[in-house]
Image (cartoon, rainbow, N blue to C red):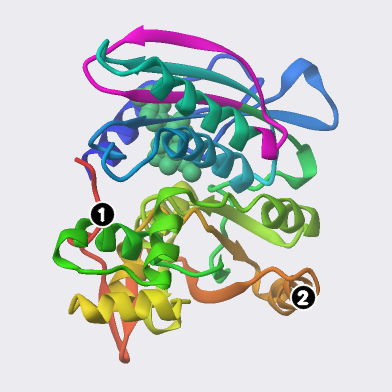
């Protein structure tokens, strides 16, 4: 949680003078009232990958490292309901890395971004002790459609797209690889989900267009961590129903094989890049119908509460979350 505390601290110390900064630090993207446009906001995000922290050269091909770094940035634009447009790409690497390796990494960035209409407009290349990639992605969103973290309301139902825990299951299979003789097709599927997540672009646009959501975030650090961000930004709390977690059969089997609780993978795993969002109770059934008609897979997993703090309900017991199991790089 060190990163979390650091961000809180810098947020406290920064006061914005320019009223065109609609939101600075604190959401998936910054929101800028650009050129006083009546219709749209500019949204800007930045995410970095560092060798041996976010990826390992033994498990990731260079193209995949590039594609992944673009994917996590596109996901932040999707979490605001926006459209990604332009990218600045900063790359650092040691001199002993082959040029073809770096070329493949850059192709991963360009190819993956191209699928979402992203055009690379610049960046920087430097020599560094380990490989790192940092992308700044600029997008746009209609003012009336923007999805923010800080707009949840007490009583809102909490929903998630897709399934949770697959990326963490894939990570565990990779970490456990040397103990296993052969990997199954489902193992490879989970590994693929870990290596290259799919940003929920169509889902984000449709959900934003529906006008039914109060708040939204993409799941990078696990739903417990990410619902904490929505709750804190909205000055509220939340209850999460552990037994409602959407868990794929493959993840369930993987967790059981490793003698872990599959629900823990879903709650704390992270890096699934699904959309976690909240909806006013009166819109809940309209949303469920909307999602069904538009083939968006969603599951209700909790509710926003006026009481602060995150509470997890499991087997009829309600316990305050103590963040001991939250996945962390620090
Ligand atoms: P996400 O997981 O969606 O990428 P982060 O947790 O990385 O979001 O960041 C939360 C917020 O803190 C964002 O608004 C981000 O821009 C801001 N932030 C993170 N690190 C820094 C930093 N070093 N300086 C300024 N703002 C930062
Ligand atoms: Mg995010």
Please give the residue where the numbered disc 1 appears in the rendered image.
327
Based on the displayed image, in which of its 4 quarters is residue 326 positioned?
bottom left
Ligand 2 within 8 Å of disc 2? The answer is: no
Magenta stretch, overall SS = strand
Q: Over which residues does the magenta segment extend? A: 114-137
Residue most extreme to the bottom: 316
Q: Is residue 280 above or below residue 23?
A: below
- Taking the spot 67% from the left edge, 49% from the top edge, the residue there is 201
On screen, residue 78 versus residue 270, left or right, reads right
- Taking the spot 42% from the left edge, 36% from the top edge, the residue there is 65
Whole-Å distance between the Cαs marked 2 and 1? 34 Å
Q: Is residue 7 above or below residue 293?
A: above
Q: What crowding class fits label 1: few (fewer than 14 Cα within 10 Å), some (14-19), or many (20 or more)?
A: some
Q: Is residue 198 above or below residue 66?
A: below
Q: Is residue 52 in the magenta section? A: no
User: Where, quadrant-wise, is the C terminus in this rendering?
Assistant: top left
Residue 138 percent coordinates (x, y)? 63, 26
- Taking the spot 40% from the left edge, 63% from the top edge, the residue there is 188
What numbered label is drawn on residue 4? Answer: none
On screen, residue 100 versus residue 39, left or right, reads left
Please give the residue where the numbered disc 2 appears in the rendered image.
286
């Amino acid at each position: 949680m060190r990163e979390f505390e650091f961000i809180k601290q810098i947020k406290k110390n920064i006061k914005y003078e320019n009223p065109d900064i609609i939101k600075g630090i604190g959401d998936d993207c910054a929101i800028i009232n650009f050129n006083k446009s009546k219709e749209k906001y500019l949204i800007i995000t930045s995410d970095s990958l560092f060798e041996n922290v976010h990826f390992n050269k033994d498990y990731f091909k260079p193209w995949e490292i590039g594609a992944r770094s673009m994917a996590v940035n596109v996901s932040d634009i999707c979490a605001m309901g926006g459209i990604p447009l332009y990218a600045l790409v900063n790359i650092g690497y040691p001199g002993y890395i082959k040029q073809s390796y770096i070329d493949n990494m850059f192709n991963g960035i360009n190819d993956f971004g191209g699928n979402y209409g992203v055009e690379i407009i610049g960046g920087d290349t430097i020599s560094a002790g380990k490989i790192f990639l940092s992308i700044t992605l600029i997008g746009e969103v209609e003012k009336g459609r923007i999805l923010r973290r800080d707009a949840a309301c007490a009583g809102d139902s909490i929903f998630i797209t897709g399934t949770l825990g697959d990326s963490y299951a894939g990570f565990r299979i990779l970490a456990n690889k040397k103990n296993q003789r052969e990997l199954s097709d489902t193992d490879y599927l989970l590994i693929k989900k870990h290596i290259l997540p799919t940003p929920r672009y169509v889902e984000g646009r449709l959900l934003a267009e529906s006008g039914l959501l109060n708040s939204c975030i993409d799941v990078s650090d696990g739903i417990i961590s990410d619902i904490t961000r929505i709750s804190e930004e909205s000055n509220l709390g939340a209850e999460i129903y552990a037994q409602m977690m959407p868990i794929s059969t493959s993840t369930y089997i993987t967790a059981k094989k490793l003698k872990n609780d599959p629900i823990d993978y879903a709650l704390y795993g992270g890096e699934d890049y699904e959309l976690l969002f909240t909806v006013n109770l009166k819109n809940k059934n309209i949303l469920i119908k909307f999602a069904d008609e538009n083939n968006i897979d969603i599951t209700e997993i909790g509710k926003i509460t006026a009481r602060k703090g995150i509470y997890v309900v499991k087997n009829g017991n309600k316990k305050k979350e103590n963040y001991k199991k939250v996945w962390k790089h620090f």
